[in-house]
Image (tube, helix red, strand yellow):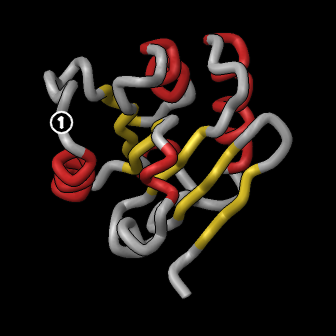
Amino acid sequence: MSAGKLKFKFDENLPIEAANLFNEFGYDAETVLSEGLQGSTDVELINVCKREGRIFITFDLDFSDVRVYSPGAVPGIIVVRLADQSIDITLSVLKKIVSAMKKESPAGKLWIADEKKIRIRENE
């Protein structure tokens, strides 16, 4: 999977360094803040991601509800679940996500990542 083909949007609850990291790895990464979308509803954010073909990355557990955000119905969602949401821990887990994307694409899937593993849900 070529880095250039995947596009991402980082939620306002993630540090700007997260999007910078993905850009450094060759991905097209934007942030909710840089696009003036802070304070938007979850539905508005997902609709923007659908229009732009961007995989959404967030700390917000609401996006892990497959009844609302069914894998395959959205470009993809990555929910990062961390007890410690410091920049260093967050970037460490995001590096693991980038590494995992060399083997499998998150497009059209729900990935839930923590310090130890990444769970992947696909449309069934």
Q: Is residue 91 visible?
A: no
Q: Is residue 113 above or below residue 11?
A: below
Query: Dot 1, crowdedness within 10 Å: few (<14), some or many (≥20)?
Result: few
Question: Could you say which quadrant of the image residue 119 lies in?
Answer: bottom right
Counting labels gives 1
Which residue is denoted by mark 1 in the rendering? 40
Q: Residue at x 34, y 65 (%)?
A: 74
The amino acid type found where label 1 is placed reads Ser
Observer-nearest of 69 and 78? 69
Can you name the residue that lies furthest to the bottom here?
124
Can you name the residue that lies furthest to the right here?
116
State the image coordinates of residue 111 (x, y, percent, origin top left).
60, 56
Q: Is residue 45 above or below residue 72?
A: above
- Provide the secondary structure element on which disc 1 rests: loop
Image quadrant containing the N terminus: bottom right
119 lies left or right of 67: right
State the image coordinates of residue 42 (x, y, percent, origin top left).
27, 47
Q: Is residue 73 visible?
A: yes
Question: Could you say which quadrant of the image residue 106 lies in?
Answer: bottom right
Q: Is residue 12 above or below residue 75?
A: above
Image quadrant containing the C terminus: bottom right
Q: Residue at x 47, y 70 (%)?
A: 66
Q: Residue at x 63, y 20 (%)?
A: 85
State the image coordinates of residue 54 (x, y, percent, origin top left).
33, 49
State the image coordinates of residue 60 (x, y, percent, origin top left).
46, 40
Q: Residue at x 19, y 28 (%)?
A: 39
